[in-house]
Amino acid sequence: MIKDILKDAETRMRAAIQKLEDDLSGIRTGRASPALVEKLPVDYYGTPTPLIQLAAISVPEPRGLLIRPFDLATVKTIERAILASDLGLTPNNDGKQIRLNLPPLTEERRRELVKVVHARLEDGRVAVRNIRRDQINNLREFEREKLISEDDLERGEEELQKVTDRFIEDISKIGHRKEAEIMEV
């Protein structure tokens, strides 16, 4: 029973970290990355659709992205979505494809992005801690229902804390890696 709770907690924490990594991949660094725009919502016939479903995104040069829509009728719509986003990029449209040139980040903008990363990391830590809290409540409920003993409850809480600490450490490593990526000139 305790092993099931630990396994569930680990699975949910791993999912929280995966969500955090996906979230951080959309934060701009000095290099162009398709992850920067692939989740960008584009109004496709009245439905917000991720850009990755509407176009092929490639990186022809280190500071540029090339977006080739599958349907040429969506070029203008994609261009509007990029302009409306908070990316701060100006698309160059030639009628068939869109080029995005990423200007170098200023020192001030890099520091702002690091603050955004720290906020997202804290959200990830909170998510992991919430999972721990839910599982501790489950363990205590089992103990109240006499399904596990007090010693088992204590052991389960200690194991759960070890798992939580491991995932919090992983979040810190991810944060240091992303911060170094952003501050790299």
Image (spheres, helix red, strand yellow):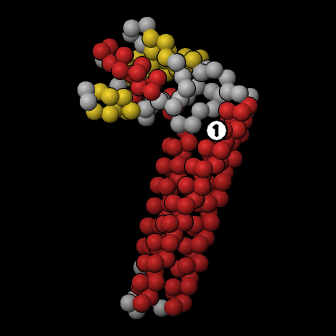
Quadrant where the image shows the N terminus: bottom left
Q: Is residue 53 left or right of residue 98?
A: left
> What residue do we see at 43% from left, 35% from top?
39
Residue 48, horizontal then vertical, whole percent: 32, 34
At 61% from the left edge and 60% from the top edge, which residue is drawn?
Answer: 168
User: With respect to residue 179, does 100 lie above or below?
Assistant: above
Residue 163's quadrant in the figure? bottom right
- Residue 110 falls left or right of residue 129: right
Number of dots carrying numbers: 1
Between 122 and 80, the one lying in front of the other is: 80
Mark 1 residue type: Leu
* Image position of 139 with respect to 35: above or below: below
| Residue 71 visible at all | yes
Front residue of this view, candidates 127 and 5: 127
> Does residue 122 lie above or below 179 as drawn?
below
Horizontal arrangement in the rendering, residue 20 relative to residue 94 (left or right): right
Task: Tell me the residue that label 1 is attached to.
Answer: 113
Image location of residue 154, percent across then percent down: 56, 85
Q: Residue at x 29, y 27 (%)?
A: 44
Q: Residue at x 71, y 33 (%)?
A: 108
Residue 84 in the image: state x and y as whole percent: 45, 27
